[in-house]
Image (cartoon, rainbow, N blue to C red):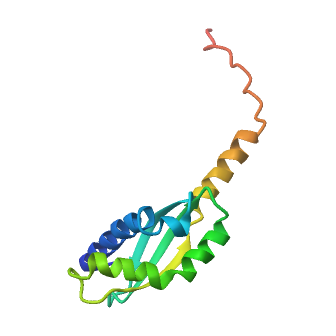
Amino acid sequence: MESKRQQKYSKLIQKELGEIFQKEAKPLVGNAMVTVVRVIMSPDLSVAKINLSLLLANNQELFDKINDHKKEIRKHLGRRIGKSVRIIPEVAFFIDESASYAQHMDKVISALDIPEAPEEDGEDED
């Protein structure tokens, strides 16, 4: 279970990274939509595990590009939160597959051919 301090840092980093991906990293991500789904901080606040949801792009290709520019993203993060934290955490990115899984399940469920239930007679009156 995360401490209050870890949760506070997680929320701060999630908010700032969201803005970084919208503004500063626009040349990096192009037209793709990158959403910071969740941030998990290590107990010593030195590592941030970041789950990203990637839409409108080749997920693996964009993820590799983001991973290659990890230091640059951390530098932008440092400029934004440097005055309020002691150390800028190392960032580790992970792809969050929940959105694509939900889309897949929706497609599977809508493709099911479920026959209608037979109509039941009303209440039997004796």
Quadrant location, the N terminus: bottom left
- Residue 118 rendering spot, x and y as whole percentages: 74, 23
Q: Is residue 75 above or below residue 104?
A: below
Residue 1 visible, this orientation: no
- Residue 48 rendering spot, x and y as whole percentages: 41, 81
Relative placement, left or right, of 121 versus 48 is right
Identified at 45% across, 81% down, the residue is: 72
Relative placement, left or right, of 91 versus 10 is right
Residue 19 visible, this orientation: yes
Identified at 29% across, 75% down, the residue is: 80
Q: Residue furthest left?
A: 83
Q: Is residue 85 above or below residue 98?
A: below
Q: Nearer the viewer, residue 2 or 123?
A: 2
Identified at 44% across, 78% down, the residue is: 73
Relative placement, left or right, of 116 versus 29 is right
- Residue 4 rendering spot, x and y as whole percentages: 25, 76
> Residue 39, located in which quarter of the rendered image?
bottom left
Q: Residue furthest top?
A: 126
Q: Nearer the viewer, residue 19 or 114?
A: 19
> Residue 110, located in which quarter of the rendered image?
top right
Q: Nearer the viewer, residue 45 or 57?
A: 57
Relative placement, left or right, of 59 versus 48 is right
Q: Is residue 90 above or below residue 123?
A: below
Tally of numbered discs: 0
Identified at 27% across, 77% down, the residue is: 81
- Residue 30 rendering spot, x and y as whole percentages: 56, 62
